Image: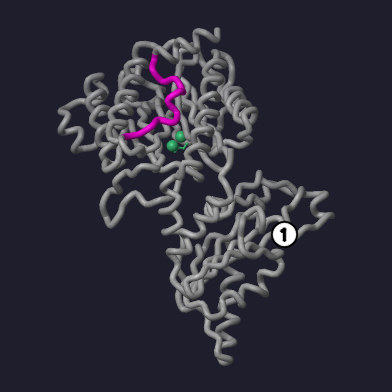
Amino acid sequence: MMIERCEYQSRRQRLAEYLQDDSLCLIPAAREVTRSRDTHYPFRQDSDFYYLTGFHEPDAVLLLLKRQGKTTSVLFCLAKDPAAEIWHGRRTGPAKAKEQVGVDHSFPLQQLPEQLPEYLAGCRQLYFAQGSYEHIDALVFACLEQQRQAGKKGQRPPGTLIDIREHLHEMRLIKSSAEVSLMRRAADISTDAHKRAMCFARPGRYEYQLEAELHHEFALQGARHPAYGTIVGSGDNGCILHYTENQSPLKDGDLILIDAGAELMGYAADITRTFPVNGRFSEAQAQLYQLVLDAQLAAFEEIKPGSTLVRATEAAVVVITRGLLDLGILSGSLEGNLAEKTYRQYFMHGLGHWLGLDVHDVGDYKVEGEDRPLEPGMVLTVEPGIYIPADADVDPKWRATGIRIEDNLLVTVDGHENLTAAAPKEIQAIEALMAGSR
Ligand code: GLY
Ligand code: MN
Ligand code: MN
């Protein structure tokens, strides 16, 4: 399962259509990042560069040159180097990369400083994401300065620098069918991992052991890296939204909140499930849990073309506020509580976000000041939660309870498809799965 070369070519073509004539667009790859002496973090390609090339090597640079309506694509990448490759791994090299990426020309990276001024000559606009990579800023600004100095000879650097991200990120917001296939696979792998963690949980086991189960399942199915730091928070830890310590023992009677998703060929899944350590929800846990689930399902009703994430949020907020009133956790009128947004004490994050190559994917949430209408091909999370910490001023039975339920929804022409529907979330389904594993 992969994205075909022609799809990358057509993405570059679409981007080029947006460029003004006599312009150059420069998109850099990511760099290796040192973790500690002589070791690096696992390499993660820059999402914009990857979206346009599918090329997974560090330090490369893609240029799109547009002149008289015609676009030329050029890739600069690491040169073949047998000695370096023995130590650090194979390199594609410019010749093979040209074929693989389907660009018009390719050159060794070390030629970029001398060739960039030639590509820039006569360009009126330069499109690039300033501030993203210091070394690219330095290279580009040195090149522009050089052209200014040469101004006496009739050369002039581009007068306009345009941030390419705005347009590129609009493209990334709408997923192609090939992208959806990859996201569906990332969702399936992540679903299997969540089920595995549910089956493994027991009092006395540790949060990090559940993390290990999740990552084991990801890797077994070809997704070697999680899309973000895995959260396994039991009891009060579930109330820390970005808890990644994952060190505590699991206690009988606690809930566990797991927020974990695999990354597959760059694409993220982002699933949260909450379940009891001992396999059975207590009555109080079940009441709060059902409330979060009802809120999520109410929000799902608004995930359809023409509706908005804000409307989905409003639907969830009404359910949560009414439920917290019914349970006696909030007091007063529904209208008064909605007006005061009192639910924010217990549900303090957004309902969801775009999902794609980045877990918090790109794309504006407002268009010309208005909430963005949902469109087919968008993928987003819907993740309401209720978090009542151990020291909350409520009946003790509610305390130390963090609940979030998060699914990944593809907007379709007539509504949505839940890509993560197979991860159990009905109370009975969770209890049945866990009972079967004991
Ligand atoms: N896992 C990060 C989030 O849910 O947004
Ligand atoms: Mn999320
Ligand atoms: Mn999440």
Q: Give percent across and percent down for residue 272.
A: 45, 29
Q: Which residue is mark 1?
A: 95
Q: Amino acid at mark 1?
A: Ala
Bounds of the magenta segment: 415-427
**Foreground of the two, 414 or 209:** 414
> Image quadrant for the N terminus?
top right
**Foreground of the two, 26 or 215:** 26
Q: Give percent across and percent down for residue 364.
A: 37, 52
**Foreground of the two, 310 or 37:** 310
Residue 282 lies left or right of residue 25; in this view the side is left
Q: How is the image coloured?
A: one colour
> Image quadrant for the C terminus?
top right
Q: Give percent across and percent down for residue 16.
A: 48, 64
Residue located at (39% from left, 43% from top): 378
Q: Which quadrant of the frame does ligand 1 lie within?
A: top left
Q: Give percent across and percent down for residue 82.
A: 83, 55
Secondary structure state at the residue bearing disc 1: helix
